[in-house]
């Protein structure tokens, strides 16, 4: 489960009180491995050991899309235009998907000799 809070609520609570999450995002069944928020704050991208990557609408908590993979997802990255999603998996592959488009990856980057820990894109894509 992913929870979103209002930061000022967290700062104002004392040890006796607990801030109530603004929103909860339910859908992953195992540990969340990565989380990204787009620059406008309107979409959340999440990945999990449950072999899925999900896109959520931040304001409503509605799941917009889910990608099912054959291996645990360890890291994700979104292009600055939000048109491409890169998903790194425990099987040492990185999958490139169109955010709006086909259910199959556009490209698979393979050949890593050791496990992938994290991926990152340069700003000059």
Image: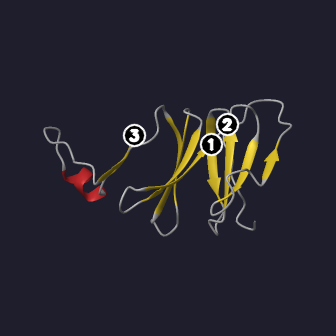
| Sooner in the amino-acid sequence: mark 1 or mark 2 | 1
Front residue of this view, candidates 52 and 113 = 52
Mark 2 residue element: loop
Judge depth for marks 1 and 2 and give the one in front: 1
Label 3, on which residue? 1
Residue 81 quadrant? bottom right
Crowding at mark 2 (Cα within 10 Å: few <14, some 14-19, many 20+): few
Judge depth for marks 2 and 3 and give the one in front: 3
Asked if the residues shown at circle 2 and circle 3 are in contact, with their CB atoms under 8 angstroms apart, the answer is no
Residue sitting at x 19%, y 53%: 12
Q: Provide residue 75's location: percent of width, then percent of height.
A: 62, 43
- 51 left or right, relative to 3: right
Image quarter (top left, top right, bottom left or bottom right) of the C terminus: bottom right
Residue 102 quadrant? bottom right
Q: Provide residue 96's location: percent of width, then percent of height.
A: 73, 52
Label 2, on which residue? 117
| Sooner in the amino-acid sequence: mark 3 or mark 1 | 3
Farthest left residue in view: 16
């Amino acid at each position: 489960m992913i929870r979103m809070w209002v930061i000022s609520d967290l700062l104002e609570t004392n040890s006796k009180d607990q801030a109530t999450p603004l929103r909860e995002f339910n859908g992953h069944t195992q540990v969340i491995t990565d989380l990204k928020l787009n620059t406008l704050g309107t979409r959340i991208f999440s990945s999990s050991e449950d072999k899925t990557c999900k896109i959520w609408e931040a304001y409503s908590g509605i799941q917009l899309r889910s990608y099912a993979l054959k291996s645990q997802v360890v890291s994700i990255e979104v292009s600055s235009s939000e048109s491409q999603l890169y998903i790194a998996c425990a099987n040492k592959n990185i999958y490139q998907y169109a955010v709006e488009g086909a259910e199959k990856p556009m490209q698979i980057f393979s050949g890593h000799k050791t496990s992938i820990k994290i991926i990152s894109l340069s700003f000059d894509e």
